[in-house]
């Protein structure tokens, strides 16, 4: 039986290859060789196809996955693979498309997760390295006066991981029809009388706004707010998908269907169309919205893997997730608040300002 | 002729300090004397006649004296010059010698409005002299000497007339608010604590907000296609108009509001007069 997993090995020394965002090439850390994405694609084309077929045949033949993993793994919604490098059994989520072997550390790709109908249209390769992400996270902690001191030392910053997150990219057109009541007010003095004239207008604006590639994350594991907040990605660097961009990073296939993501994309497009159309109303003393109608015409949907550096850590029994755009470096994440520090700041500010204001009031 | 007389007499005055004013008692000075030659004889004559009319009508002299350099006549400034001339020529009307003089020294471009006598100082308050100066200085800045002097003479007449009517031009100066005694009541401390707690709460709230950055997007402005906005309908339709009229309430002017005082006239020096001087 063919392996369902591919290890991209250095053609020179058979050491594991990893994709290097800075150079945009696959790098061998053992012998220092580097290879272009096209070279590795050509080299591993047959092997990837065989791995994809191996996985596809097993799924289709029995209606459910029944590979080399244990029954326990299947019952848990997991999948088991054998590492082609050391033979160890890898237990992965059923959406895992790229991972690394916990025993030998070799990057491993599951081509069957990203082939045929499941193959992404695009990928934006990682541009920023793990070191960049660690530096950004340390910088993010700086100046946060309410952050518990122990949090930064205990959150295992070394465990930050590069993940290719699946996104649906929606094209479409939003038609907005918005009505307002506008007023124009003018005043003049006639003798001892102030005359105020108010003109009322029915104002209507309607138009269409075309959108391209509104991203909505297609992974149930990723919180939507985190994925939204690290936008935007620079689409000028979108590339046709290739497995060769994945070694060295984690990757998931989508597990949220595009139909379930339409609502969020439609909402964003509709709100923006109303905003843009409304911005054309000018020349009034006041403008009060009366109503709006929005119609969305959905267009092409693309599937892409976008680069995200992620760190999930626990603090006082609560999960904290940080995400950094692996292309632009935009970093977000909710931080814990130290109640003691918050109270100390509140008490200190209140006491200090009370003294200051009292001193001022003393002389008034 | 009279100009020459003035020059001679003032030279004597300059040379013999301490000379008694009685030495000039017999001398006479026109209402308008132009040693610097700013006015044509016709202009000077017309002004002189008008100043004389006003002075006679209200029994309060209106004078103009222009010299090239006042320091040639007195050991002092333009104010000293004005006082010496007014006293030396026994100018003014009545026992109090009521009158006003505009003295000008061209070399320093100094001027002084000198008011004398009880009625003179009543009519020409500090504020009145200030307004009078403003009325002619703009003409002088344009070298419109005749126009400036006309304004001076006519406006002096107005000030004298108002004073005769018991309403001299003056400025109402409200009394300054009494300085409160420094004190710190418990109410003030409580107010301070309340404001401080509010400020502290807002600041800490803002710091807490910085700790939460994962926010779901509700807009998609970054993904609008280039040239992808097409406004099809732009309709602004007039519906109706409302007009409101509101009477502006104006408080009737109080003849003498309370809690303040009029500026009045600041008498200075030993000559019993008041000055308003400056550069033109």
Image (cartoon, rainbow, N blue to C red):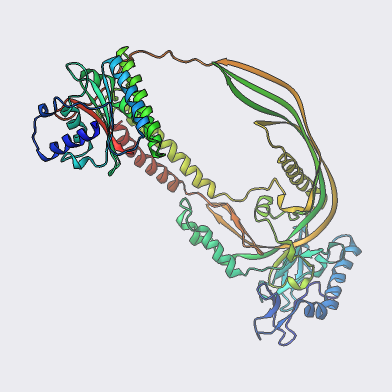
Q: Position of residue B212 (x, y in %)?
A: 57, 49
Q: In the rendered view, would you say B91 is above or below B213? A: above
User: Which of the 4 quarters of the picture holds residue A215?
Assistant: bottom right
Q: Is residue A138 left or right of residue A261?
A: left
Looking at this view, is A301 or B68 the one in front? B68
Horizontal side of residue B243 vs B121, given as left or right: right
Badge count: 0
Residue A185, visible in the rendered structure: yes
Observer able to see residue B168: no
* Residue A153 located left or right of residue B183: right
The residue at the point 16 percent across, 29 percent down is B88
Quarter of the figure with the N terminus of chain B: top left
Toward the viewer: A343 or A87?
A: A343
Which residue is located at x 71 percent, y 61 percent?
A234
Q: Quadrant of the C terminus of chain B?
A: top left
Q: What residue is rendered at 26% in x and 16% in y?
A: B59
Give the left or right position of residue B73, taking residue B34 as reference: left
Query: Could you say which is closer to the camera, residue B41 or residue B186?
Result: B41
Query: Which quadrant holds residue A307?
Result: bottom right
Q: Pinpoint residue B125: horizontal percent, then vertical percent.
A: 28, 23
Say above or below: B149 vs A334. Answer: above
Where B167 falls versus A150 (above or below)?
Answer: above
């Amino acid at each position: 039986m063919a392996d369902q997993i591919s290890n991209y090995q250095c053609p020179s020394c058979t050491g594991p290859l990893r994709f290097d965002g800075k150079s945009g090439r696959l790098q061998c850390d053992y012998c220092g060789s580097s290879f272009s994405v096209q070279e590795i694609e050509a080299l591993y084309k047959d092997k990837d196809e065989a791995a994809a077929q191996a996985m596809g045949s097993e799924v289709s033949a029995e209606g459910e996955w029944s590979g080399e993993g244990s029954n326990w793994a299947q019952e848990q919604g997991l999948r088991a693979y054998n590492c082609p490098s050391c033979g160890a059994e890898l237990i992965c989520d059923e959406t895992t498309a790229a991972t690394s072997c916990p025993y030998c550390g070799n990057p491993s790709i599951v081509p069957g997760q990203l082939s045929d109908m499941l193959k992404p249209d695009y990928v934006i390769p990682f541009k920023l390295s793990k070191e960049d992400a660690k530096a950004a996270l340390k910088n993010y902690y700086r100046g946060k006066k309410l952050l518990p001191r122990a949090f930064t030392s205990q959150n295992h910053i070394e465990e930050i991981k590069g993940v290719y997150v699946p996104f649906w990219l929606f094209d479409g057109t939003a038609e907005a029809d918005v009505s307002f009541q506008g007023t124009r007010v003018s005043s003049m003095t006639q003798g001892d009388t102030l005359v105020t004239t108010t003109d009322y207008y029915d104002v209507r604006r309607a138009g269409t706004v075309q959108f391209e590639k509104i991203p909505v994350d297609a992974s149930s594991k990723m919180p939507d707010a985190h994925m939204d907040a690290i936008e935007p990605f620079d689409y000028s660097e979108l590339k046709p998908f290739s497995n060769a961009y994945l070694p060295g990073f984690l990757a998931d296939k989508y597990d949220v269907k595009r139909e379930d993501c339409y609502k969020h994309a439609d909402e964003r497009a509709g709100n923006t169309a109303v905003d843009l159309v409304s911005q054309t109303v000018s020349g009034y003393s006041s403008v009060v919205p009366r109503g709006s109608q929005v119609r969305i015409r959905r267009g092409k949907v693309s599937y892409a893997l976008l680069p995200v550096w992620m760190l999930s850590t626990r603090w006082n029994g609560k999960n904290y997730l940080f995400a950094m755009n692996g292309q632009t470096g935009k970093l977000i994440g909710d931080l814990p608040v130290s109640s003691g520090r918050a109270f100390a700041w509140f008490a200190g500010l209140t006491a200090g300002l009370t003294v200051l204001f009292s001193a001022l009031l003393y002389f008034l | 002729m009279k100009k020459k007389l003035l020059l001679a007499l003032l030279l004597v005055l300059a040379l013999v300090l301490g000379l008694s004013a009685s030495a000039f008692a017999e001398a006479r000075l026109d209402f308008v004397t132009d040693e610097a030659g700013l006015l044509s004889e016709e202009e000077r004559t017309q002004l002189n006649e008008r100043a004389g009319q006003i002075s006679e009508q209200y029994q309060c002299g209106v004078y103009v004296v222009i010299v090239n350099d006042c320091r040639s006549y007195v050991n002092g400034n333009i104010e000293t010059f004005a006082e010496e001339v007014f006293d030396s020529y026994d100018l003014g009307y009545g026992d109090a010698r009521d009158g006003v003089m505009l003295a000008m020294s061209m070399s320093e471009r100094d001027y002084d409005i000198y008011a004398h006598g009880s009625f003179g100082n009543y009519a020409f308050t500090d504020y009145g002299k200030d307004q009078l100066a403003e009325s002619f200085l703009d003409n002088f800045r344009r070298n419109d000497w005749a126009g400036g002097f006309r304004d001076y003479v006519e406006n002096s007449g107005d000030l004298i007339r108002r004073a005769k009517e018991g309403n001299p031009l003056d400025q109402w100066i409200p009394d300054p608010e009494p300085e409160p005694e420094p004190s710190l009541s418990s109410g003030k401390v409580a107010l301070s604590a309340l404001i401080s707690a509010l400020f502290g709460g807002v600041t800490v709230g803002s710091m807490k907000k910085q700790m939460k950055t994962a926010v779901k997007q509700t807009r998609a402005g970054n993904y609008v296609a280039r040239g992808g906005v097409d406004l099809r309908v732009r309709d602004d339709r007039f519906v109706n108009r409302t007009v409101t009229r509101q009477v502006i309430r104006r408080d009737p002017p109080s003849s003498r509001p309370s809690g303040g005082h009029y500026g009045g006239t600041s008498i200075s020096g030993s000559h019993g007069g008041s000055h308003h001087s400056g550069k033109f």
